[in-house]
Image (cartoon, helix red, strand yellow):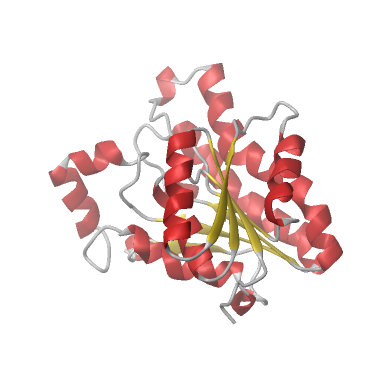
Amino acid sequence: MFDLTGKVALITGATSGIGQQQAVALAGAGAKIVAIGRRVERLEETVASIKAGGGEGAALQAELMLDGSLSSVAQQAAQYFGPIDILFNTAGVNLRQHADDVTEDSWKQTLDLNLGVPFSLAQHLVPAMRQKRWGRIINIASLQSSRAFKNGIAYGASKGGVSQLTRAMAEAWSSDGINCNAIAPGFFPTELTAKVFEDEAAAQRLADSTAIGRNGRLEDLDGITVFLASGASDYITGQVIAVDGGFTAK
């Protein structure tokens, strides 16, 4: 049920953190990986990790913007291993601005990348998935999809939107065999959370806020990543699944 042999997965934000971890996990389950990001050297590191584990991967350098270029990105991605079966919308930005300091530009940047790009990129990939009557779209939600955090008004708004986007995607496309779900990670060590983890006391307070008693390790995401991408999740769609050590349970 968890075998992804013959499937092609596209992961945005695959240069580091969660996206990079997802790329390696999916390759380990047999998928061929197209890794998208801005930094070529980091993309090549991701692909090298995939190949070191015996998998197949390719790097696609791209700026993900709502400027009409996503159609070209989708076409380029399909040139490596064929049509995309699995899309992980993992790229994101969190500028950590107080509400008083948010500008029109920073608001637009956050909402475009975190919410607009996942929909638009999926829209370009759906026709090929529909032809096969099989596809997976997995978005990245957040604790801030349902909770308010300091200096997170734009990010929280975008991630709240991701939760509803996921449900709307499921309503639109699941009858075509395309399941749409989201993962809502707790606190994991990534570039977006680097400032949090640099403060040991703050990181410990977050760990103490979980039911398990620790913050996340990137490998904690491997299981849910492969599960939602595979046939094991055939009857699951429109769901936002928290992987947060029980943070939202308390």
Q: Position of residue 161 (x, y in %)?
A: 60, 44
Q: Position of residue 8 (x, y in %)?
A: 66, 60
Is 35 on the left-hand or right-hand side of 66? Answer: left
Is residue 122 among the parts visible in the rendering? no
Q: Residue at x 31, y 63 (%)?
A: 250
Q: Residue at x 26, y 36 (%)?
A: 195
In the picture, the quarter occupied by the N terminus is bottom right
Extreme residue toward the left, this view = 201
Is residue 177 among the parts visible in the rendering? yes
Q: Position of residue 42 (x, y in %)?
A: 43, 40
In the rendered picture of this protein, how many numbered marks are placed on residues? 0
Q: Residue at x 23, y 44 (%)?
A: 197
Q: Position of residue 32 (x, y in %)?
A: 60, 61
Is 239 on the left-hand or right-hand side of 23? Answer: right
Q: Residue at x 39, y 26 (%)?
A: 97
Front residue (pair 28, 196)? 28
Front residue (pair 79, 7)? 79
Query: Up-down: is 86 above or below 99?
Result: below
Extreme residue toward the bottom, this view = 1
Is 50 on the left-hand or right-hand side of 74? Answer: left
